Image (tube, coloured by chain):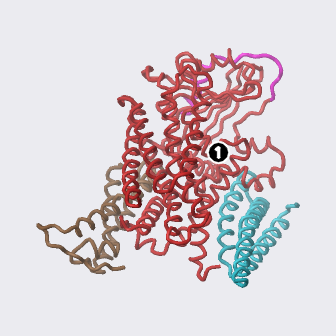
Chain colours: A cyan, B brown, C red
Amino acid sequence: MISSFALRKHAILAITARVIAGVGGGYASSALLAIAAASALPLSRSEAAILSTLLALICWPVMMILCFSTRTAVHAWGATVAFCLMVGAVAILAGWRP
Amino acid sequence: MLLPIASLALAAVCLLAFATPRQATTLFTPPLLPRHQSFLRTAGFFLLATSFLLCCLAAHAARMLLALTGLLGVYAVLIALCCTAWMHWKKTPSPARKITRTDHKR
Amino acid sequence: MKPTFRACMAWLHTWSGLTMGWLLLAMTLAGTLSVFRPEINTWMRPELRTQSTVNPDMATQTAIQWLSVHAAKSPTWYLEAANARAPYVQALWLEGDAYQDHALDPQTGSPSPLRDTRGGDFFYRFHFELQLPYPWGRLIAAVAAMALVLILLTGIIAHKRIFLDFFTFRPNKGQRSWLDAHNLLGVAALPFHLMIAFTGALTLANMLMPWGLTTLYHQDFSALEHDFNPAGIERPASGKAGTLAPIGPVLADINHRFAPNRLIRLTISNPSDAASVIQAIAAPSASGVGVETHTLSYDGTTGTLLAEHKEARPIMGFYRFLYGLHVAHFAPVFTRWLYFLSGLGLAGVIATGLHLWTRKRCQRHRGFGFRLVERVNVGMIAGIPTAFACFFLANRLLPPSLATRAQIEVQIVFCVWAILLLYAALRPATVAWRDLLGTAALACLGVALLNGLPVTPFQIGVGVTALSLTCLFSYATWRMACAAKEKS
């Protein structure tokens, strides 16, 4: 009885972690992708802004799918944070300053 | 221009529907052989591709392609319902017709 | 999570579908009706029926004459030109603190011969503003659009036999039939569903995902405005009074430059000022899909051309194309009906999906969550169409001269919706389904009857749709009545 309750609580915690990673972390990833693409793409301002927005809108559902397909919730967070760092690095290299 | 393309698309969707394994085995007696199914499928895709190509060549290509895509959806639903009705008619026992029950391939 | 990737996606599809389903159902039904926004606008103003044909330029001229007298102090007038689908001028202007949004009679330019109603604009605004104050409604709608993209993608991944089961529909097999219907409606119009969800999120992208814009433009709104609207002239009011040049010659020049496309929107900034500007936007060309691809700006007091822009930039053109795909202004009649049917299909996908959730769990332990979903499903799936139908009924039944009748029509929608939700919450589900579906059938029948004998194309369209929906809801009511009788 106690072990099944603990198991259920663990499952709820894992799912909540994935949801936050997917929704919050996914949004942050998409935002950073938009910033990186806007800064790095060799296009005029308006065109770079539009293309980066399109990429970001595609990125968010994909990140959500990713966060629910990793083996554990920790992996989901790891993947999200890794993506954010990678894309943030690209943005900073392209001249963006937060 | 839309009418010939719409007719081609309808023929294409019909062929593709009949070539689907479930429909090929349940709607027809005797059931369509796999090689007949793949022939119908190829013919169906060929007609579908032709209809898309004709849209590209027509005036106002973008609008024609959009209309065709929407029309294909309507066709898919209607043909699916027709297949359901056909299957129901086949299964309904009728004294004038010999009852045929085919093996359902799941 | 679950053992396989597909099972994880099925889980995500179920739970994101359940949490966002009711909101998406409301947005989808309102958006589907918005396809015929001008037609519904015209249907809801039967006083327009007496006009034979409307000359769009004459209508615009009389509208501007009326506005010059009654809205002279307003900083901007937004006019939508009259056309065959909408034989009136829709004018929006700021009066003090509040926006005035009225249809102007094409003969007199005044709003008074036409009954005060939101018309089709109610459905249009509701589907992306949700009757909530700015910016909350739009933000929620934007998130819902993104959720719909996610739900569609996970649904595609989770659907195992997507090609083998393409044409499969097996009725009278309980849960299996509902799943077949959900899959059939979803897969048959899948390009439409994906397109409308993604482009819907795109139209609200400057709220949802502005980071690309802010990174490049920071707070430079005038540069942003110039890049997105190169023919736009930003001129602050000079303070000196001025009168608009006679609009006839300006309209003639606009038509000449836009030919063969017609004028759809006119924006007049600072109309009573010496620094007034008239901006004109053309309808999409006969082969085009994108919005706002050709714009003109004129000096208001002299009527001379200041700027012209035809969109040639590839990515900007692509953005306008995607925007145009969503708003479907380009669509000829046939395509517009395809949009309408596909929108109803999407509503069907959402409704069958919501119903499947309860169907799958009705044999198990029925906790509070199950009972909540079961009852809200009835209130939403049967309640929203009834509430929307009551908007049409209210338009015909409320006296035309009633003050604030536009607000009352909208309030009736939400009152009916609330009453139906309450009824569904209090009665057992099978009974509630039968009763609410019956009410929906009666409401649609009411619309068909109040439509009168169909004379105009708008009446024919409304009549056919209302009668078809009456038949659909009547059949559903009959099925639920049989089920309710079996249960008791």
Closest to the observer: C413 or C239?
Answer: C413
What residue do we see at 72% from left, 53% from top? C208
- Disc 1 is placed on an element classified as loop
- Expressed as whole percent of the image width and height from the top left, the position of residue C226 reads 75, 41
- Expressed as whole percent of the image width and height from the top left, the position of residue A33 reads 75, 64
Residue C78 quadrant: top right
**Quadrant that contains the C terminus of chain A:** bottom right
Give above or below for C237 relative to C25: above
Residue range in magenta is C236-260
Disc 1: which residue: C130
Residue C104 quadrant: top right
What residue do we see at 28% from left, 74% from top? B26
What residue do we see at 81% from left, 55% from top? C215
Question: Which subunit holds the residue at mark 1?
Answer: C
**Residue C58 visible, this orientation:** no
Give above or below for B86 relative to C464: below
In-image side of B71 versus C306 (left or right): left
- Crowding near pointer 1: few (<14 within 10 Å), some, many (20+)? many
